[in-house]
């Protein structure tokens, strides 16, 4: 309910603070005293369009702020659906700048006028001579019925299930769309991965192949050079090793004259042994340099295979290919997980759908159970308004469409005279009849929780006479 109203710089009002106690409050005054100005300011936080002409001082902001006490079960789902912070004591704030721009806030969060109006039409109803209590709005008719049936907990439970269902359905649709778009990609990605898997890539392989091919291309020059080097080291008669052996023998004979000659002989021997080992290594390498045409062809083919893969994946090295292969494997796993997730979500959707249908059926049963009583009360109140022959009926129709309120559609039907068939209220009620039906409904709304504040302006408008 509305607990406090603050008005600043609106029409004739400089600043006004109003506290609204529980129960019935009457605001009286002569014509022109300002009652309608208060209603005009209140209409700003109800989502009505702002008019710069209503601003008292156009150099300052016009601010209207209302403080409301809210029922958690009834209003928290709305706040969650619109990403708003819920508080049992909530503040609705509307301001008009000197430039004429308007901004709206719910608990300090900026909101559009549509969201503001959607909330406040459930908080306050202004009964005026120009307003028909939303009787043509079937969602309001359903709200009235739920209020009378005390369906707050059932609606909250159903709304939670419905929101879960809607969330799962949306996630499932997104995953299916993703899967359909990438189904062809999945096959291609698998092909690319298999291609690299079958290639048996190894880090450093390309450099090793390129080095072997370079040596094979220059094998003749290398063989010639190494052959000459080996011959110089160990050619009969004039080789380095032969000379060292001869020097070693001479120094060995001189050892008897001075120990230093023995040391030199040992050093020459060490050089000879080292050079002889080097000769053996060079000879081994010479034997390996015998060109094998089949091996060269194999190396060329392998290098071409690696370079083709690199070009396809737009990389420069085998190491980058290995990274790409890992990326492909991860992507394939993700696509596989998508299919598994779709299967899981289908099962979850089926379960939550069954829960939603069951919760909606409970709401439907609760609604139709109170229809006779509500019809009876409305007809009784209409009788007190000099419409003793009026008939009122509430039709609760199940539909295939599920919303946050279930799958019921409510239609108020009315007849003003005995024996006359019932038709939709909005189509057959005259202005005076509609005013009396509205007044009867307002009397019932006063006992409900969904419309905690009702403001009557010109309460007798359209009723007239003894009524």
Image: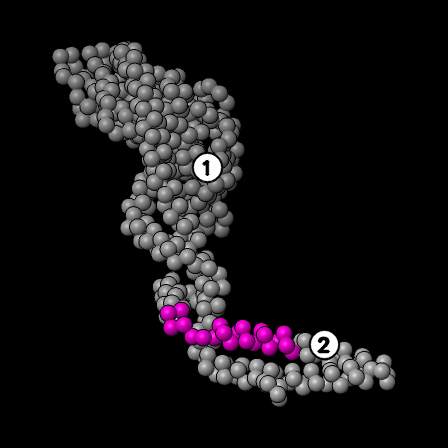
The residue sitting at 35% across, 56% down in the picture is 195
Q: Tell me, for residue 270, which label it has, or none.
A: 2
Q: Where is residue 272 in the image (x, y as percent from the top left)?
A: 68, 79
Whether 155 is among the magenta residues is no
Whether 283 is among the magenta residues is yes
The image quarter containing residue 216 is bottom left
> Considering depth in this image, is 186 or 273 the residue closer to the camera?
273
Determine which residue is flagged by label 1. Answer: 84
Residue 390, compared with residue 14, is above or below; it is above
The rendered magenta stretch, by its main secondary structure, is classed as: helix
Q: Tell me, for residue 66, which label it has, or none.
A: none
Quick one: label 1 or label 2, which is nearer the N terminus?
A: 1
Q: Position of residue 327 (x, y in %)?
A: 43, 53
Disc 2 crowd, CA 10 A, few/some/many (<14, 14-19, 20+): some
Mark 1 in CB contact with mark 2 (< 8 angstroms): no
Q: Position of residue 308 (x, y in %)?
A: 36, 66
């Amino acid at each position: 309910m509305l607990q406090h109203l603050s008005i600043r710089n609106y029409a004739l009002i400089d600043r006004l603070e109003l506290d609204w106690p529980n129960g019935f409050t009457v605001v009286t005054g002569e014509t022109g005293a300002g009652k309608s100005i208060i209603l005009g300011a209140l209409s700003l936080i109800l989502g009505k369009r702002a008019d710069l002409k209503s601003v008292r001082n156009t150099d300052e902001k016009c601010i209207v702020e209302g403080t409301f006490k809210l029922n958690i079960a009834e209003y928290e789902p709305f706040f969650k659906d619109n990403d708003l912070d819920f508080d049992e004591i909530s503040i609705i704030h509307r301001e008009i700048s000197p430039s004429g721009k308007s901004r709206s806030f719910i608990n300090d969060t900026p909101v559009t006028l549509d969201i503001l109006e959607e909330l406040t039409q459930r908080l306050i109803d202004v009964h005026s001579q120009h307003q028909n209590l939303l009787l043509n709005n079937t969602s309001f008719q359903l709200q009235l019925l739920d209020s009378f049936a005390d369906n707050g907990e059932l609606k909250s439970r159903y709304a939670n299930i419905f929101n879960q269902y809607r969330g799962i359905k949306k996630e499932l649709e997104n995953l299916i769309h993703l899967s359909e778009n990438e189904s062809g990609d999945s096959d291609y990605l698998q092909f690319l991965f298999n291609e690299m898997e079958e290639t048996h890539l190894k880090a450093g392989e390309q450099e090793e192949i390129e080095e072997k091919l370079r040596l094979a291309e220059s094998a003749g020059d290398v063989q010639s050079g190494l052959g000459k080097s080996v011959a110089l080291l160990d050619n009969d008669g004039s080789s380095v090793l032969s000379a060292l052996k001869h020097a070693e023998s001479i120094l060995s004979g001189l050892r008897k004259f001075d120990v230093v000659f023995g040391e030199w002989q040992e050093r020459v021997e060490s050089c000879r042994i080292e050079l002889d080992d080097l000769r053996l290594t060079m000879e081994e390498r010479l034997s390996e340099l015998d060109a094998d045409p089949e091996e060269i062809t194999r190396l060329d083919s392998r290098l071409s295979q690696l370079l083709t893969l690199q070009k396809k994946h737009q990389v420069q090295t085998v190491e980058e290919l290995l990274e790409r292969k890992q990326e492909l494997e991860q992507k394939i796993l993700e696509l596989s997980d998508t299919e598994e997730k779709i299967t899981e979500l289908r099962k979850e959707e089926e379960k939550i759908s069954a829960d939603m249908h069951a919760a909606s059926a409970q709401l439907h049963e609760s609604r139709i159970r109170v229809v006779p009583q509500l019809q009876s009360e409305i007809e009784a109140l209409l009788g007190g308004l000099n419409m003793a022959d009026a008939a009122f009926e509430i039709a609760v129709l199940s539909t295939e469409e599920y919303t946050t309120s279930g799958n019921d559609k409510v239609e108020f039907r009315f007849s003003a005279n005995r024996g006359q068939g019932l038709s939709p209220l909005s189509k057959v009620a005259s202005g005076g009849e509609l005013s009396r039906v509205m007044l009867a409904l307002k009397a019932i709304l006063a006992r409900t929780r969904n419309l905690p504040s009702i403001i009557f302006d010109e309460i007798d408008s359209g009723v007239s006479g003894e009524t």
